[in-house]
Image (cartoon, grey):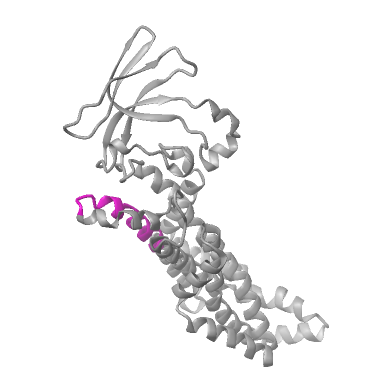
Amino acid sequence: MQGLTALAVHKFKRSYLGVGSIFFIASVGLVSIFAYVLSPDRSQYANQMHLSIHSKPPGFHVQMLVQPNALKARQNKLDRLFFGSKFPDVELPISSYRIESDKLIYTPFEAKDLEGIENVVDYATTPKPYIVEKTFYLGTDNYGRDVLSRVLVGSRISFFIGFIAVFISLIIGIFLGSVSGYFGGKIDDFVMFLINVTWSIPTLLLVIAITLALGKGYWQVFIAVGLTMWVEVARVVRGEVMSVKEQQYITAARALGMTDFRIILRHILPNVMAPVIVISAANFAAAILIESGLSFLGIGAQPPMASWGAMIKNHYNAIVLGQPYLAIIPGLCIMALVMAFMLMGNTLREALDVKASN
């Protein structure tokens, strides 16, 4: 077994696409975990709005008058690190400013051909306001939010739905598939009936039905997607278990008086996991696409939560309005992550195929 594992690892390392996809997926995972550390906008859900600078192109920069929020200290630093600031500093785009005595006189940023009216703030207040230069590297959306920050924070939904959905599908699929394949008879007939019924319903329609039953929200989407992806896992596990249970070492285990549960857990499942791993990689990609579709339909992550699918939904009309990047950027992110999981799955299938070893 160790020799076959070493051979599979060696074959996987020889694939530049497989290794590259692993590194890319790991990078996206780290970005999704530390999104608020990397994000220019560290407000919760990267939802800091600046309507005066909405729909600006990538690379746009502007001066910001920042008024520190005294309530920031109420939030735990760890909570702020992983979930964003619930009490962000107040930012105001300005076109010019000057300081006279203890007064800060500024002109708010306005659209073209409009002049802002000068305003005055007390520069001696505590905490003291300050001026920063801010660059929006991917531009701003139609609410003036930083697109780069929304993309980084939105990666969490797309990335973690894969883990949670695949985890749920593995628990259900491996249990039903192993029980069905090992015991056969009426149990097998019942499980196959469930598989056929579930398979006969369009996946997206079934996910929508479960989501509406559980209620709108990203956790409900995670569960709904997981509850629809167990079918393929169960079918493959059932077939593998039916093949493995006829082996001589399983017969010997029964003769030694081992329980059915121990035989399945200790001797059968470890020998049928190779195809399950490959299916899990494909299910990751499928879960990301399904979530994106649900968010596009307005059933997935709800505003103001950032999601790549929701970003496409909110800005797909910008493609014909001269701002295609607002929809293309999250679309490219979805495409790249899905492709990485598919490449990893293909490489795993080739690496775990013992018959193809030379």
Residue at (49% x, 79% y) in the render: 355
Residue 110 appears left or right of 177: left
Q: Which residues are magenta?
A: 321-340
Percent across and percent down for residue 353 are: 49, 75
Residue occupying the far right of the picture: 257
Residue at (42% x, 58% y) in the render: 21
Instruction: Name the quadrant containing residue 39.
Output: top left
Q: Nearer the viewer, residue 28 or 192?
A: 192
Residue 306 appears left or right of 167: left
Q: Is residue 91 above or below residue 347?
A: above
Percent across and percent down for residue 185 are: 68, 93
Main SS, magenta residues? helix
Percent across and percent down for residue 81 are: 54, 38
Residue at (50% x, 43% y) in the render: 34
Q: Nearer the viewer, residue 3 or 28?
A: 28
Residue 265 appears left or right of 274: right
Query: Does residue 358 appear anywhere in the picture?
Result: no
Query: Is 339 in the magenta?
Result: yes
Percent across and percent down for residue 41 are: 42, 37
Residue 318 appears left or right of 213: left
